[in-house]
Image (cartoon, helix red, strand yellow):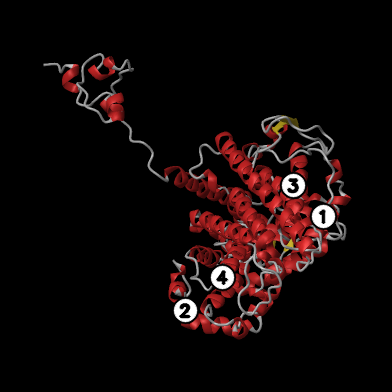
């Protein structure tokens, strides 16, 4: 006997199932749908599919990245047969005018981008590339792995190079293209050397190779006038900053700027173009070369210099704000456009003017807002003079209001950006550039106002505290802690080193402000210290800052005159920028013994900062 449709149908209609209401399962429409004038449809049982589970998209994207990495390694092995790597007839003679491998432990070879030892043995030619080159970062598959690590981990907050073209150059090993990017390749290797799982090198040897590469890159870059020299020095600038070598970082940035000026990168931008009428207005891509990809890389290198030059010195009083031409120069293109092949990029000559990428938002903030803070801090003010102090407070409040208004515009721009670019992402609001911009904005507020917060006993305070300044700084610290709490551990491990500095600024203010009020240490300090601990697994700068915070909390009830931490740490009249470098020198020198003593009594918070017993100390 054939079954009737009503007998096969054992589920409610789609509308009733969605509203979780009782369905009478009538055909062709149920009673509720007829009554409410709704479309009534029944899902066929054989076509029922469960929805996507939480985190499925992110896991799928990670799986795709892993498969792409494996594909790159397989292609490199196919393109680099062992028989070629041992053939002395293909060896290239490098003259004084040709770029060569800057890592002197290997020599450049004309075969498809393998780097081999100066005296290869006959036996070595019979070994597979994966086994033969596990100690050479410029041999395959190690080189492809290191470049892929760069684009998977650090490109998200340092998008100065075109990934499709760069990886194609590395995997297909086109001679001219590779030589044009040799300095950038070496800088990427120096940056990602400690992330490699293929290289069979201990930490000490990796450190030696990294140091050798950075020194040679610096020497080579100073004698070149090429875009890859600018890119290499930008990467070295971030690497030095992450190690706590601030002066080296700024010197590398200065070299990058000077090379860019010789290339006339900044002068090529259209600063005198009319203003865009709205954030969605379109602008034409400026043309400097015959390649849209190269033009965009030049544009991104210029703006990365401007952004790092502004954000890396928040709190300096030397008038860092540079004079820029009026107008609206082109900003980097959208992230989705930047991931497309060069042929597609060349066929897309228009871009949204503003809010087209999170990188653009960060650039706008650094150039338009942070520069105002720099100019304000560079002014000499006598706080004991009532009139000057009153003028200072009025101007500081106006700047704070401007930063607050910019925050509102930033939130709105991020929402527009999410809808246009990141709708398919699982957590688009946690984009690396968005998080960095948010936290650096809080750093700007704290740096602007914290000198008018109450000082702890033992620190001279010539003027009475300003309640407005204290409340605004506390709010900025809370905002930073909230943002950091939202970050996954994996996101903290590969975050921008500038974010590490912002976390330390908030943690320092929390400790000093609580000590001045003789109050409990805020629980938000747990989140900040845990973030430093997690970041410290990758960046030495975070480890230095974490050690300082641990010592300061350990002696929280100790008077400042008896404190082992330098007195400057507790003096809010000094910006964190002004005390950071001396504190790092102290924690590496005289403070190293204090760090060991504190570590012996307090286990590092592997999962929570509560092990520092903040509540007990408070």
Query: Distance of mark 2 from mark 4, alpha carbons?
Result: 18 Å
| Numbered disc in front, either 2 or 1 | 2
Residue at x 68%, y 43% (from the top left corner):
360
Residue, far left: 1
On residue 331, which mark appears? none
Image quarter hosting the N terminus: top left
Determine which quarter of the picture holds residue 317.
Answer: bottom right
> What is the distance, in whole Å, between disc 3 and disc 2 at their CAs?
44 Å
3D distance between C-alphas at marks 4 and 3: 31 Å
Kindly state the secondary structure of the residue where label 2 is placed: loop
Of circles 4 and 3, the one toward us is 4
Q: Position of residue 563 (x, y in %)?
A: 60, 83
**Could you tell which of marks 2 and 1 lies nearer the N-terminus?**
1
- Residue 398 visible, this orientation: yes
> Dot 1: few (<14), some (14–19), or many (≥20) neighbours within 10 Å?
many
Is 337 above or below relative to 222? above
Q: Position of residue 246 (x, y in %)?
A: 73, 67
Between disc 4 and disc 3, whose residue precedes? 3
Disc 4 crowd, CA 10 A, few/some/many (<14, 14-19, 20+): many
Q: Are marks 4 and 3 in contact (CB under 8 Å)?
A: no
Q: CA distance from mark 1 to mark 4?
A: 37 Å
Which residue is identified by label 4? 511
Kind of element beneath mark 1: helix
- Which badge, 1 or 4, is on the more N-terminal residue? 1
Is the C-beta separation of discs 3 and 2 under 8 Å? Answer: no
Identify the mark nearer the N-term, 1 or 3. 1
Residue tagged 2: 602
Q: Nearer the viewer, residue 617 or 530?
A: 617
The residue where tag 3 is placed is 368
Cα separation, mark 2 vs mark 1, equals 45 Å
**Residue 87 visible here:** no
What residue did someone put label 1 on? 257
């Amino acid at each position: 006997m054939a079954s009737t449709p009503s007998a096969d149908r054992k589920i409610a209609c789609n509308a009733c199932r969605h509203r979780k209401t009782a369905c009478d399962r009538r055909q062709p429409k149920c009673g509720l749908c007829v009554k409410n004038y709704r479309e009534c449809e029944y899902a066929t049982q054989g076509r029922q599919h469960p929805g996507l589970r939480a985190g499925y998209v992110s896991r799928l994207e990670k799986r795709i990245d892993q498969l792409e990495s494996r594909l790159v390694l397989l292609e490199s092995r196919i393109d680099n047969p062992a028989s070629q790597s041992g053939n002395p007839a293909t060896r290239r003679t490098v003259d004084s005018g040709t770029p060569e491998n800057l890592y002197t432990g290997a020599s450049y070879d004309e075969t498809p981008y393998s780097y081999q030892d100066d005296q290869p043995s006959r036996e070595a030619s019979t070994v597979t590339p994966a086994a033969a080159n596990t100690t050479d970062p410029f041999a395959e598959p190690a080189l492809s792995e290191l470049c892929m690590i760069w684009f998977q981990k650090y490109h998200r907050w340092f998008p100065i190079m075109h990934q499709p073209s760069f990886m194609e150059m590395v995997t297909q090993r086109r001679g001219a293209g590779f030589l044009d990017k040799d300095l950038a390749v070496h800088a990427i290797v120096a940056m990602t050397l400690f992330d490699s799982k293929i290289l069979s090198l201990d930490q000490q040897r990796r450190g030696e190779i990294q140091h050798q590469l950075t020194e040679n890159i610096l020497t080579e870059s100073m004698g070149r006038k090429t875009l890859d020299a600018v890119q290499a020095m930008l990467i070295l600038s971030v690497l030095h900053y992450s190690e706590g070598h601030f002066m080296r970082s700024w010197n590398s940035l200065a070299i990058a700027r000077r090379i860019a000026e010789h290339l006339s990168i900044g002068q090529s931008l259209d600063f005198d173009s009319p203003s865009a009428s709205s954030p969605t207005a379109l602008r034409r891509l400026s043309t400097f070369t015959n390649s849209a990809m190269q033009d965009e890389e030049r544009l991104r290198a210029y703006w990365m210099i401007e952004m790092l030059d502004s954000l890396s010195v928040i709190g300096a009083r030397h008038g860092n704000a540079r004079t820029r031409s009026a107008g609206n120069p082109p900003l980097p293109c959208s992230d989705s456009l930047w991931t497309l092949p060069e042929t597609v990029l060349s066929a897309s000559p228009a871009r949204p003017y503003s809010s087209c990428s999170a990188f653009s938002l960060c650039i706008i903030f650094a150039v338009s807002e942070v520069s105002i803070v720099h100019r304000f801090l560079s002014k000499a003010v006598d706080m004991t003079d009532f009139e000057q102090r009153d003028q200072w407070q009025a101007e500081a409040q106006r700047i704070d209001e401007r930063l607050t208004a910019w925050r509102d515009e930033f939130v709105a721009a991020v929402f527009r950006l999410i809808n246009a670019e990141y709708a398919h992402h699982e957590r688009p609001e946690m984009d690396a550039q968005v998080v960095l911009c948010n936290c650096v904005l809080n750093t700007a507020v704290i740096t602007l106002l914290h000198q008018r917060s109450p000082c702890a006993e033992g620190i001279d305070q010539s003027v009475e505290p300003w309640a407005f300044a204290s409340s605004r700084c506390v709010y900025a610290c809370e905002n930073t802690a909230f943002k950091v709490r939202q970050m996954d551990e994996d996101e903290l491990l590969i975050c921008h080193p500038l974010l590490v500095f912002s976390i330390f600024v908030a943690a320092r203010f929390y400790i000093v402000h609580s000590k001045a009020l003789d109050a409990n240490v805020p629980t938000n300090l747990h989140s900040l210290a845990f973030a430093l601990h997690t970041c410290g697994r990758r960046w030495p700068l975070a480890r230095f800052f974490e050690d300082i915070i641990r010592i300061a909390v350990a002696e929280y009830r100790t008077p400042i005159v008896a404190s082992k931490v330098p007195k400057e740490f507790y003096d809010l009249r000094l910006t964190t920028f002004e005390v950071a470098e001396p504190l790092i020198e102290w924690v590496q020198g005289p403070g190293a013994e204090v760090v060991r003593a504190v570590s012996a009594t307090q286990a590092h918070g592997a999962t929570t900062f509560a092990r520092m017993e903040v509540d007990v100390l408070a």
